[in-house]
Image: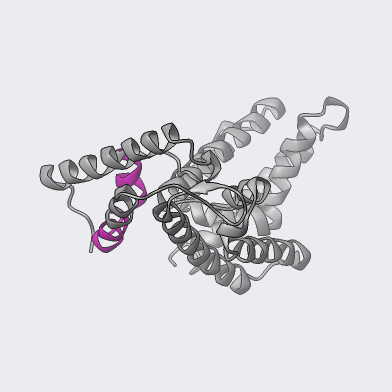
C-alpha cells in the first residue's frame, strides 16, 4: 500500500528518527565501537527510500527497537556493543541480502553478449551475500569495516541509485562536450534514459555492450593520450541511442 504522508505520519517518523539519532550519540559517549554503530538518518531519507506502508512500519519498529535500553558489552571479536546494536545490524544485513538476492535473480535472467561480465557481477553479489550472512559478534574491526562496505539500507540504496543516474548523465555530457556531438543526438538519448529506472540503468551499465561502450569512451577520454576520436565517440553514442530504442520497446522497461 502506497504511503500517504500526512502530518501525523510525518510527525511520528520525525520523532522515531530523532530518538534513534539521540541513541547513537549516547552510545558514542559510552565508548561503543563506532564501526558497529549505524549511520544517523533523516526523515527525508525515510520518505525517499521506503515506498509502502508495511515496509515503513517495519523500519520504524526497527529504529525504535534500537533505541531501547541496552548495556554495552564486549563481543567475541573484541568490539563493544549492546545486544540491540547487534540485532539492528543483523536486521540491516538480512534486508540487504534480500535485495542482493533479487538483484542476482534479475541478472540471471538477462541475456547478454558478454557472459563473463555477467558472471563476474553475479559472483560479486554472491560474495556480498555470503559476507553479510556471517556472525558479526565474531568479527574484529577489520572484518566489520568490510561488512559495512557491503551493507546498504533501503534509504541509502535509493539515494545511491539516484546519484548513479545523475552521474551517468554527467558522464554522457562530458563525452559529448569533448567530441562536439550533435545536440539532437544528446537530447534523444537523455530523453530515452529518463524512461529507465535507476535500477534498470545500473543493470544495463554493468551488462549491456552499448552502455559499456560509452563507459569505456569516458574512461579513455580522461587520459588524453588514449582518447578516442570524435567519430568513434559519436558512433558509440549512436549505438547507445539504437539500443535504447530496443529497450524501450521491450518488456525490460516495463518490468
Q: Nearer the viewer, residue 132 or 203?
A: 132
* Quadrant of the rendered image containing residue 25: top left
Locate residue 43 relative to residue 79 in the image: left or right: left
Residue located at (81% from left, 35% from top): 228
Q: Split into 4 quadrants, where in the image is the N terminus?
A: bottom left
Magenta stretch: dominant SS?
helix
Q: Nearer the viewer, residue 61 or 182?
A: 61
Q: Please give the range of residues in magenta.
A: 44-59
Residue located at (32% from left, 36% from top): 22
Residue located at (65% from left, 26% from top): 177
Residue located at (68% from left, 60% from top): 124
Q: How many numbered discs?
A: 0
Locate residue 254 relative to residue 189 in the image: left or right: left
Q: Position of residue 67 (x, y in %)?
A: 31, 47
Q: Position of residue 226 (x, y in %)?
A: 86, 32
Q: Split into 4 quadrants, where in the image is the C terminus?
A: bottom left
Locate residue 74 relative to residue 11 in the image: left or right: right
From what the image shows, is residue 223 above or below residue 27? Answer: above
Q: Nearer the viewer, residue 136 or 199?
A: 136
Q: Is residue 27 magenta?
A: no
The way the protein has been coloured in the rendering is: one colour
* Quadrant of the rendered image containing residue 185: top right
Q: Is residue 49 magenta?
A: yes
Q: Position of residue 222 (x, y in %)?
A: 76, 29
Q: Position of residue 202 (x, y in %)?
A: 57, 53
Q: Nearer the viewer, residue 74 or 114?
A: 74
Amino acid at each position: 500500500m502506497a504511503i500517504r504522508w500526512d502530518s501525523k505520519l510525518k510527525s511520528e517518523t520525525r520523532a522515531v528518527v530523532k530518538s534513534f539519532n539521540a541513541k547513537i550519540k549516547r552510545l558514542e559517549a559510552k565508548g561503543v565501537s563506532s564501526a558497529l554503530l549505524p549511520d544517523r538518518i533523516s526523515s527525508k531519507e525515510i520518505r525517499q527510500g521506503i515506498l509502502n506502508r508495511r515496509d515503513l512500519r517495519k523500519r520504524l519498529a526497527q529504529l525504535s527497537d534500537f533505541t531501547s535500553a541496552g548495556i554495552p558489552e564486549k563481543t567475541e571479536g573484541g568490539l563493544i556493543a549492546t545486544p540491540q546494536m547487534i540485532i539492528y545490524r543483523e536486521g540491516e544485513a538480512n534486508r540487504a541480502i534480500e535485495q542482493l538476492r533479487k538483484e542476482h535473480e534479475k541478472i540471471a535472467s538477462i541475456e547478454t553478449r558478454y557472459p563473463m561480465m555477467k558472471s563476474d557481477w553475479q559472483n560479486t553479489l554472491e560474495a556480498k551475500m555470503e559476507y553479510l550472512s556471517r556472525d558479526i559478534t565474531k568479527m574484529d574491526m577489520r572484518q566489520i569495516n568490510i561488512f559495512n562496505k557491503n551493507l546498504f539500507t533501503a534509504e541509502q540504496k535509493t539515494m545511491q541509485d539516484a546519484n548513479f543516474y545523475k552521474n551517468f548523465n554527467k558522464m554522457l555530457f562530458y563525452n559529448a562536450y569533448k567530441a562536439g556531438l550533435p545536440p539532437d543526438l544528446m537530447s534523444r538519448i537523455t530523453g530515452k534514459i529518463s524512461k529507465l529506472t535507476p535500477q534498470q540503468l545500473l543493470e544495463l551499465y554493468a551488462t549491456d555492450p552499448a552502455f559499456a561502450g560509452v563507459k569505456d569512451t569516458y574512461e579513455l577520454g580522461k587520459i588524453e593520450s588514449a582518447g578516442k576520436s570524435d567519430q568513434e565517440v559519436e558512433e558509440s553514442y549512436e549505438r547507445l541511442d539504437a539500443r535504447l530504442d530496443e529497450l524501450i520497446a521491450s518488456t525490460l522497461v516495463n518490468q
